[in-house]
Image (spheres, rainbow, N blue to C red):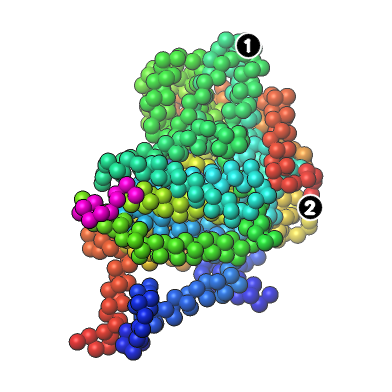
Amino acid sequence: MKMKTLAVMALAGSMTAGTAMADLVIPDLSYRTGPYAAGGVPFSDGYQDYFALLNARDGGIGGEPVRVIECETAYNTERGVECYEATKGEGALIYQPLSTGITYQLIPRTTADNIPLHTMGYGRTSAANGEVFNWVFNYPANYWDAASVAVNYLLDENGGSLDGKTIALVYHNSAYGKEPIRTLEDLSALHGFTLTQLAVDHPGQEQKSQWLQIRRERPDYVLMWGWGVMNQVAVQEAANIGFPMENFIGNWWAGAEHDVTPAGMAANGYKSLNMNPITDYPVLSEIQSLVHEAGNAAGDGSNLGSVLYVRGMYAAMLAAEAIANAQDIHGVADVTPAMVRDGMEALEITNARMTELGMEGIGPEFAVTCQNHGGTGQGLVQQWNASAGVWEPLTGFISPDASVIAPLIAEDSAAFAAESGITPGCL
Amino acid sequence: MLYREAGDFKTSYQADSQTFPIAFDRWRYWAVLVIAFCVVPFFVNAYWANAILVPFLIYAIAAIGLNILTGYCGQVSLGTGGFMAVGAYACYKLMTSFPDVSIVIHIILAGGITAAVGAAFGLPSLRIKGFYLAVATLAAQFFLVWMFNKVSWFYNYSASGQINAPERFVAGIAVTGPNTAPWAQYMICLVFLTICALIARNLTRGTIGRSWMAIRDMDIAAEIIGVNPLKAKLTAFAVSSFFIGISGALFFAVYLGAVEVGEAFGIQKSFLVLFMIIIGGLGSLFGSFAGAAFLVLLPVALKVIGVDLLGWPTDLVAHLQLVIVGGLIMFFLIKEPHGLAQLWRVAKEKLRLWPFPY
């Protein structure tokens, strides 16, 4: 015991300036530097601003103030591990690393340390199986859903048949970009389209050869799994070869303002998936008046209302709702990570609740269960209007094809359970 | 006063050519070993192990490996990241194919496989030198990363291309996997580092090390006095890659537990290890340790000072780190090409004379 106290003291002396108060600690593993900063900055701003709003307006969650600890990862797994180890001792309640690579590091670690991990729309898809991944959640949607939503949208566009069409997938050559391949291969067999795979290596500035191949082969559609600087380059390259923008669809990490503005008018008509339609949510004006005008904005405050800002805010809202839920279930305000996990597993997001929060229609309605940590998987398609400079939603929420995805999730999570010696079951 | 040769009489050739000719250094050496093996494991916690000690130990092995090749044999290599990847993937394939064999044997075998790959990529060094060799090793870096991404056999056909280290035990104690105790992680890396450093020290002061240094200082002259450049260069590549392979295997299995080749073993890893030996000191074992410690500690120290104590924005501190590392590399290349090790050497010379420098 004494050794442990000594160790804790050494740790506390070396790395904490703030004192451990009875508050809700939320680490923000952000990246404001490096080739992925363009996406990391607005997401982190939205994430932090929402908690700042809760502190300013409601005095925190259930009367407990929220303390956000920001830690810079630069999208680098080693730094992510360092951030995780540095923050978990502070009583971190939930981790949202916004990086598939870091997620793979944290899945075994958070499971061993009993801290919930929420990877919203990224991370390991098969974590949707909550019986195998007790501590990992990826609601409201995951990559395989995204692939299926994109194909369902294209089916709709083509009168229900993609027979004989060719679809090229331009993907980031990493765990993130490779995730949808299995699903798209299954879907191509099911719907009869041909899938071409074009890998783009980290960080993604070199795409000449991939787009030359697209120019040569003229696929009917191009799907993109891109992030960071890769998106801007891809949109510009597509414009350079004159690829019709309305046939170019990015996933929800490849559809923010900064991805299309560098190409100017040439990017007009580019489509992407989104989880959160962009409208004037009342909560944004509350953030403007209570957080930004009070001088507490995270970052430079210029990202308010952008696509990834809204998504970061949405992620923070889901975390806050889960914590509030945990407080209800356990009847204490100062919750532990294990209680937050219970709150996440019993989370239900309804339209009424979203309206109450000033975020009407920001996401689909969903309920989390022990078996399903993945939500409904719905996404919508939006299109860039370059002259107005706005993303316009083209569709409502589209559902993925569960008959394709559910068996894939069952197969992959069973393989993981066998590999790591996990007996599936609820906690 | 304490730090001097006076009164320390050597009565045998063996004593005369020992690593630490000064008694004080010998005591210090044993004190460091005792503290590292008998004190630190009882105090290490998850943060110290994962953020500071384990990466330091692993990078020190990699830096020793690259220092043998670049510092002792004069062959510039930018393929360190690729060779670490070979070690990691070899270790992963061995771990998953032969789960009953001890992880220690797998790590050593991974080093052996990397040595073979390194020697193969070292063949061009017989024809080309300097910048051109650097470009050839750069090709190895890109080729290896591409291969581990492209050929799914290496990652057992997993959907994401990630490799995950399953749980493995040494004498009943988990050393890989999420349930590893921090001290176990630390100890396995420390044991490997100690053995690697002893091997490296004894190699570099023996015949083989002298032939490497002869090649480094002037390869034509070395050839004329009877050093076989084929043997010297290829052994340097093999031994260097062996150490780098071990560090790659530990990096994957013990430290991170899951890696993705492009992200973990990309070109920036090669540069990082190269910076370690430039800042630490080319051609010095102490320099490998000093450089690794410096570049592992610097970001953590900057973060603690900048973010936790001064409350600066995290991005500012991260950018500042790039500026500082870049500035230091320029400073060392211009002012002290032999790195921190030379500063240490100068300090020791001064200490010998202190307090009467005349």
Side (left or right) of A112 relative to B324: right
Give the position of the N terminus of chain B as an image quadrant: bottom left
Q: Is residue A2 magenta?
A: no
Residue under numbered circle 1: A161
**Quadrant of the image occupied by residue B179:** bottom right
> Which amino acid does the dot numbered 1 rest on?
Ser
The chain letter under disc 2 is A
User: Does residue A98 show up?
Assistant: no
Residue B8 vertical placement versus B159 (above, below): below
Q: What span is in magenta? A: B221-231
Q: Nearer the viewer, mark 2 or mark 1?
A: 1
Residue B77 vertical placement versus B330 (above, below): above
Give the position of the C terminus of chain B as an image quadrant: bottom left
From the top left corner, tell me how far across and down residue A79 is, in percent.
50, 53
Please report the residue visible at 45 percent of the width from the left and 35 percent of the height from the top: B146
Residue under numbered circle 2: A329
> Which amino acid does the dot numbered 2 rest on?
Ile
Q: Secondary structure at mark 1?
A: loop
Side (left or right) of B252 relative to A267: right
The chain letter under disc 1 is A
**Quadrant of the image occupied by residue A59:** bottom right
